[in-house]
Image (tube, rainbow, N blue to C red):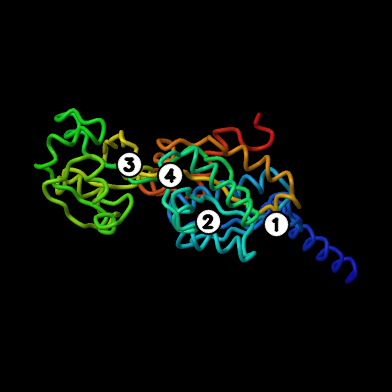
Amino acid sequence: MIKNKTNRIITLIASIFLLAGCALPGLGGGFGGETIRVAGLNSTEGQIISSMVQQLIEEETDYNVELISNLGTGIVGHHALVNGDADVLAPTYTGTDIVAIFGETASYDADETMAYLQERFSNEYNHKYYDTMGFENTYAFMVTEELAQEKNLEKVSDLKDIADDLRAGFDQTWLIREGDGYPAFQEAYEFSFGETYPMQIGLVYDAVASGDMDVVLGYSTDGRILSNNLVVLEDDLGFFPPYEGSVRATDEILESNPELDALFERLVGQIDTELMQQLNFEADDNLLEPSIVAERFLIENNYFRGEGS
């Protein structure tokens, strides 16, 4: 009697572990398999993209994923790859990498910048720098829909005739920055704003939406552009260098796990700037977890096995 009871208990415990192994999120089919370490940034966008890569690996391969999230800057992510603490960085931005890692002035030609970085990272770091995912998170001038309609504003040059009467809110570092900062902007576009106010960039969206500012400089993929119905003006002189979002992985992890290469290639060119705004909006304004936003994108676009991808 005691022996039978003991056997039933052992069987029950084994069943619980088996079921847990099948059901726990993140384990996927890779229980006991190799672990791929994916590094991501602490921004909403960074969390969405890194989670997208994590879920794609877990669903499409037998690997486990360790997500190293909330890294403060792309430079920290770069060092995580270089030091062997991570295998993949998602996203990485061309404008940040060329200036902060190589100490060079960014080219204003996006294709030229991408090709240059792909060669440099391959030769000097043994990293594969994938082509852009399609979005560009760069500085962008924005105004309210009302002002855009009233003054017929579509591009930055359209501000020239009314700039003297405008209150402009800018990232305080951009006002004095060399290269692509305000001094160079005035020279390139040949006009200045009547009044300029240094601000934290996170405050500029509400400032222009509330009427405290007439024009502000924000980030092109920020979800608050949609939530505040702001109009992004075209940088018609190509003043701001490209900040295209991409994935970067070590040659070591790609050579030892070659199926990852085709997986990351599937993300190339799939998310344009407007879609990235929408994804950020879903997290920041609709308060969805970035991982949920990432999962919905992957499902809706048939990325998962067995869904026609």
Identified at 55% across, 63% down, the residue is 79
Instruction: For marks 4 and 2, give the one nearer the viewer.
Output: 4
Q: Position of residue 9 (x, y in %)?
A: 81, 65
Depth order, front residue of 294/191:
191
Ranked by sequence position, the earlier of labels 3 and 1 is 1
Depth order, front residue of 64/249:
249
Question: What is the number of the mark on residue 107?
Answer: 4
Identified at 65% across, 47% down, the residue is 57
| Tag 4: amino acid | Ser
Q: Position of residue 298 (x, y in %)?
A: 56, 39
Depth order, front residue of 280/22:
280
| Tag 1: amino acid | Ala
Q: Label 3: which residue?
A: 239
Question: What is the number of the mark on residue 20?
Answer: 1
Ranked by sequence position, the earlier of labels 2 and 3 is 2
Q: Position of residue 266 (x, y in %)?
A: 61, 37
Identified at 54% across, 59% down, the residue is 78
Q: Secondary structure at mark 2?
A: strand
| Tag 2: amino acid | Gly
The C terminus - image quarter: top right
Q: Position of residue 169 (x, y in %)?
A: 20, 51
| Tag 3: amino acid | Phe
Depth order, front residue of 271/128:
128
Ranked by sequence position, the earlier of labels 4 and 2 is 2
